[in-house]
Structures are given as C-alpha cells and as structure tokens.
C-alpha cells in the first residue's frame, strides 16, 4: 500500500537551542510583563471605621481582640488589615473581551488540533479511501 | 533499588518500581502544602464561610477531575499523563498546550513552595534574634537539593515523599484533635464567623483560591510509566488522595476559622502554624512548623518530578527539542529535563511575589481542567465504551464533564475579578506559543509515531 | 559575621555543589553514551504492562 510517511527534517543543535530559549523567553515575558506594567492584582478600598486606635473602634469584639493580641498585633498595626477590602467592581467590556479571548483560544486550539490529528490518524491507520 | 527490569535490548526507559502508596504520596504530597499556606487567601476574598463553600465547590470540581482522570489515565497510561492523553484523543497542538499547562502549573507551584520555605527559615531566624536575615539562599537550596534528589532516581524521591507527606498529614490531624473540637474550650466559631462580608460575589471570588486546597492532585498520572500496574494503582491512588484532601481541607478550615479573626486569616502566610501559636502549646508549634516545612518539601519534590516528566515526554515526541527526551542510563530519570527546569524555577522563586506565582499556577491548572472536561466527551465519542478496554469507567457520563466545565467557567470569572491582567497575559502567551507550534515547531514531529496506543481507528476519522 | 550568615553561606555553597554535581554528571553522561541510546525510550513500552485482553489489541492491522 502506498502510504506516504512524513519524514521530518532533522533539527540542528543550534535550532534546538534557539527553540528552547525562545519558549523560555516567552514564559518570562508572560509572567513579568503584568508585574512591570504595574497592572497586577485587583483594586482595594478601605472601609471607614470609627476609631483606628482601639479594638472597639475597629469593630472587634473582646474575644477577637484577644486573638489579635496573641498574634502580636496592636490596634494600630492591625488596622490596615482590618479595614482593607477588595474592590469587585468591573467593566463589562473587559469581561466580554476576556470571555472572547478564552473562547477564541480554545476554538483555535481545537481547530488546529483537528487538522493535525487527521494527519496522524491517516498515517497510522492508512487513508480512509484505501480501506 | 531494582535494576534491569526495563531494559529491552539496546533500549533504556524509565524504571517501573512504584506502588499505589507512592501514587498517593505523589498526589497528596504535591497538594497537602495547600492546607499549610495559600488556601486562606480564599478567606480574604470572601470571608470564612465563603472559603468553606469554595472548599466544597472546589472539592466537587476535583471529584469530577478525579473521576474523569481515572477513566482516561487507566486507559492511556504513559509518562506525561494528560499530555499523552491529549495527543491520542484531541490532537498534537492540544497536547503541546496541555504539556505546557503541566510544566507551568508544577514549576510555579515548586517556586511557591521554595518561597514559603525561605520565608519560614527567615521567620525562625528573626525569632531567634538575628538581624538582617535573608530568605534567598534557602529558596535556592530547596530547589537545588530536590532537583538533585530527582536526578538521582525516582524511587528514593517518592519514598521520601511518602514519609514527608505522612508526617505533614498527621500534623493536621493532631492539631485538629488537640483543639478539642467537641468542646468550646479553644475553638469559638460564634465569635469569629461573620457571614458573608462581600455577599455572594465574595463566594465566587474565593473560588479562585479554593482550587488551592486540591491543586495538583491530577499529577498522579505523570508517573504512569514508573508505576507497576498503572491501570489499578493510578485510580486507587488518585481517589484515596482526593478523600485525604477533603478531610484535611475541612479540618484545616474548622481549626483556623475557630481560632482567628477572618481579616487576619485572609492574609496570613502560614495559617496552620499561626493556629498552633494561638493554642499556646509549644509542642504543637514545633509540630506545625515541621509539618509546614515537610509539606513544602514534599510538594516541591513532586512538582519537579511531574514537570520534568511532562517536559521529557514532549521532547521525546519532538514537540520540544529532542535533546530533552533522554533518560539517564544509570539513574533512569529524565535528567536533562530536570536540569533545564532548575534555572526556570529559581528565576521565578527569586524574583516574583508569592501571590503572582500562585495565580499563574492556578491558571495553568484551570486551563488543564477545562481541557479535561472537553477531552472526556471526545474520548467517549471517538472510542465508545465497548471498542477498547478501559481500566475504570466513571459513572453518570456526561454529567461530571458538564459540571466540571461549568465550575471552570465560574472560576475563570473569579480569577478575572482579582487578576484580570494576568489572565489575559497568560492567554496571549498560550495563543502565541500555539501559533509558534503549529507553524514552526510541528514540522519536526513525526506524524504517525505520535499514536502509540494499541487502539482501533477512532470513530469519525 | 554571625551564625545565621554562616548558615546562609553554607546554603549557597551547598546549592553550588549540588548544581555543579548535576551539571558535571550530565556532561559526563552525554559524552559517555551514544545519543541514540539515551533517547531510545518510547512511549509504547507501556503496553506490555497494561491489562488489555488480547482480542482487542491492535485493531489497526
């Protein structure tokens, strides 16, 4: 049977090295770009409290205050932790873009995989028409 | 250590020496560190009650993962785990991406462990009264030592993991018992639980870090080529691992949320160690310090094991330079992959902050779970139940896959709420890498050789 | 120099030793063995251990 087998070219040592470094570079860019652009992490807000210098003013009960003290905190050092809240407001356009990117990525992945997979199956099992 | 078992003429391969206990140790060992650090960020995201809901919802997500994974892994048992599965079931580009998810998730988790360990040593140094104490040397040493151990052989590596994991798990159980959960002597949930400070959006947001309770349990199938009877050991090790983690996660939550205010818990670096401090018992403090150290070591150890095997498998298939597909003739380990990933882990552990590293790890895992849910549906369609022999068949198909897909979507939204920019950066990275693979790298790959299973032709092709 | 600093230097030194150990062993192994032998591991070698009943093996023939 005339199955055409794809014979890949042999990659040079330099090519292998370049490909490894390319991937490594890509990984580093992906991780450190958001950090350098200062875009990392969500927004935070402070909630208002009556008095930042006492446990009562921070809204802590006696039992809660006792544990803070055991952990080595004073009202002053704990106040920033107690009053900080995450900001969960978001822009619907950003959400739409994100959804589009994720769905688009998976669509691309499955489409390309499908065509590559067909080649693999054809070579492994022979073409449909030959059987 | 037994030698010679896997020599076929002039060939060398990985050594088949591991039993179900090793699989359990690999799976739980990687994940258990999540109870010692990281899970509590879920408390910060939505309050203690939200973290418990997230813990159970994530538990459901991972039960689906374990069910699906057990079926596919017991059928496609090869080093590289989900990577080899994607290659047989979806196609080469998907496999390349899955391989990258695995390497990413585990290398980042390894970096996070090294950072935590460095922080602990630094804390102890400061508590002992030394000034100007650095964590960096210990971060680097952790990675170097564990890489060296992995380089030397898989049996010793995972036997050490078994011991470390067992001790760390005992530490959680002993702490739970010591706080006398049947009385109100130490734990006082009424004083500390405050409902949902953010409402239900907080519950969704906390799901992001809820994954951290279990992240990495699916790593069990990376060792498929080194397990003695993969079709039996892998499902068994994964399922018992899942049960262990559900118990440990619930106990951890119960102790911590009954001991400290949620505002503190939500930003603590080592919550279980803090819980031990609050009990006022010196032996418990020592025990939980040891437990935290051991769990980070076991986790980093398993991560190096898994990441290097995924990288190795990709090299072997020429998805990456073939140079990485080598096995050490004496140690029987993928030694070049292990060495190559050392500087990668060191760079991240040295320069990146902990929550960023964790987020990248979680995102890579999440992409992997999304793939799994789609993968199993394709698997059942291409090879219906009676066409090939499966080691295990998961019930209620396609319900687990659909539940998993839904929970993944919710978790993407949770990540978007807190780390939208990283999410986009990560997706762009994978898209660029995919294009690179499809248009450049794939020309070096042999086509038919990628399909190594003794299966009939898939339906519809 | 206090004791903790000594500990830090020891950690650096040990890291370097382990790193060099791996690097040298890798270079030695690369030189000693033929590249074809080192990369001879194949994914298909799993099959002999998998419990698949014989009639179902290899439907592609």
Image (cartoon, helix red, strand yellow):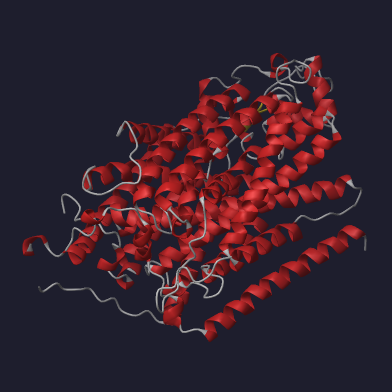
- At which x and y percent is residue B56? 52, 28
Image point (32%, 67%), residue name: B442
For the C terminus of chain B, the image quarter is bottom left
- Residue C34 versus residue B309 in the image, above or below: below
Q: How many marks?
A: 0
- At which x and y percent is residue B274? 76, 34
Q: Hey, which quadrant is residue C46 in on the image?
A: bottom left
**Image-based side of B47 in relation to A93, left or right:** right
On the question of residue B353 being in view, the answer is no
Image point (46%, 84%), residue name: C34
- At which x and y percent is residue B64? 41, 35
- At which x and y percent is residue A4? 16, 73
Image point (74%, 52%), residue name: B118
Question: Looking at the image, which is closer to me, B247 or A83?
Answer: B247
- Residue B356 versus residue A56 in the image, above or below: below
For the N terminus of chain B, the image quarter is bottom right
On the question of residue B436 being in view, the answer is yes
**Image-based side of B338 in relation to B61, left or right:** right
**Image-based side of C60 in relation to B436, left or right:** left
């Amino acid at each position: 049977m005339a199955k055409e087998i794809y014979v890949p070219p042999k990659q040079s040592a330099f090519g292998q090295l370049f490909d490894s470094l390319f991937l490594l570079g890509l990984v580093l860019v992906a991780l450190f770009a958001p950090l350098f652009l200062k875009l990392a992490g969500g927004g935070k807000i402070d909630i208002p409290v009556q008095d930042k210098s006492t446990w009562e003013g921070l809204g802590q009960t006696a039992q809660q205050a006792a544990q803070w003290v055991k952990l080595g905190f004073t009202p002053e050092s704990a106040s920033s932790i107690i009053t900080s809240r995450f900001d969960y407001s978001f822009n619907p356009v950003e959400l739409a873009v994100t959804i589009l990117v994720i769905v688009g990525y998976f669509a691309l992945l499955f489409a390309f995989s499908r065509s590559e997979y067909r080649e693999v199956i054809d070579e492994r099992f022979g073409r449909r028409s030959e059987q | 250590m037994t030698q010679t078992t896997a020599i076929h003429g002039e060939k060398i391969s990985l050594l088949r020496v591991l039993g179900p206990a090793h699989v359990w140790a690999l799976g739980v060992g990687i994940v258990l560190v999540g109870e010692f650090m990281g899970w509590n960020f879920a408390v910060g995201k939505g309050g203690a009650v939200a973290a418990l809901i997230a813990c159970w919802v994530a538990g459901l997500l991972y039960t689906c993962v374990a069910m699906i994974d057990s079926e596919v892994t017991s059928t496609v048992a090869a080093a590289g785990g989900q990577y080899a599965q994607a290659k047989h079931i979806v196609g080469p580009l998907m496999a390349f991406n899955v391989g990258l998810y695995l390497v990413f998730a585990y290398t980042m988790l390894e970096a996070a462990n090294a950072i935590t360990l460095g922080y602990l040593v630094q804390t102890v140094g400061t508590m002992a009264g030394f000034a100007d104490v650095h964590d960096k040397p210990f971060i680097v040493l952790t990675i170097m030592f564990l890489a060296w151990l992995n380089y030397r052989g898989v049996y010793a590596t995972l036997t050490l993991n078994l011991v470390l994991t067992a001790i760390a798990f005992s530490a959680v159980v002993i702490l739970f018992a010591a706080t006398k959960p049947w009385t109100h002597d130490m734990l006082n949930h009424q004083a500390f639980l405050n409902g949902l400070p953010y409402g239900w959006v907080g519950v969704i947001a906390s799901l992001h870090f809820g994954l951290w309770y279990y992240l990495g349990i699916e790593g069990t199938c990376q060792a498929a080529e080194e397990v003695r009877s993969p079709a039996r050991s892998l499902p068994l090790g994964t399922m018992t691992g899942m049960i262990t983690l559900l118990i440990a996660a619930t106990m951890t939550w119960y102790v911590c949320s009954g001991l400290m205010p949620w505002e503190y818990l939500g930003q603590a670096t080592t919550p279980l160690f803090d819980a031990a401090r609050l009990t006022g018992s010196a032996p418990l403090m020592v025990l939980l310090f040891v437990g935290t150290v051991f769990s980070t070591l076991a986790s980093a150890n398993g991560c190096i094991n898994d990441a290097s095997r995924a990288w190795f498998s990709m090299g072997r298939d020429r998805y990456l330079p073939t140079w990485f597909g080598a096995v050490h003739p004496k140690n029987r380990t993928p030694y070049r992959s292990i060495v190559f990933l050392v500087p990668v882990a060191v760079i991240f552990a040295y320069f990146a902050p902990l929550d960023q590293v964790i987020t990248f790890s979680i995102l890579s895992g999440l992409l992997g779970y999304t793939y799994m849910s789609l993968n199993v549906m394709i698997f059942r369609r291409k090879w219906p139940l009676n066409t090939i022999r499966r080691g295990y068949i998961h019930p209620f198909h396609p319900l687990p896959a659909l539940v998993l897909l839904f929970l993944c979507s919710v978790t993407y939204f949770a990540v978007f709420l807190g780390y939208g920019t990283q999410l986009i950066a990560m997706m762009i990275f994978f898209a660029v890498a995919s294009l690179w693979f499809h248009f450049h790298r794939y020309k070096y790959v042999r086509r038919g050789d990628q399909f190594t299973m003794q299966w009939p032709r898939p339906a519809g092709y | 120099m206090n004791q903790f600093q000594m500990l830090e230097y020891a950690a650096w030194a040990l890291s370097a030793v382990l790193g060099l150990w791996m690097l040298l062993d890798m270079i030695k192994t690369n030189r000693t063995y033929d590249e074809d032998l080192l990369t001879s591991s194949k994914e298909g070698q799993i099959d002999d251990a998998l419990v698949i009943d014989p009639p179902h093996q290899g439907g592609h023939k």
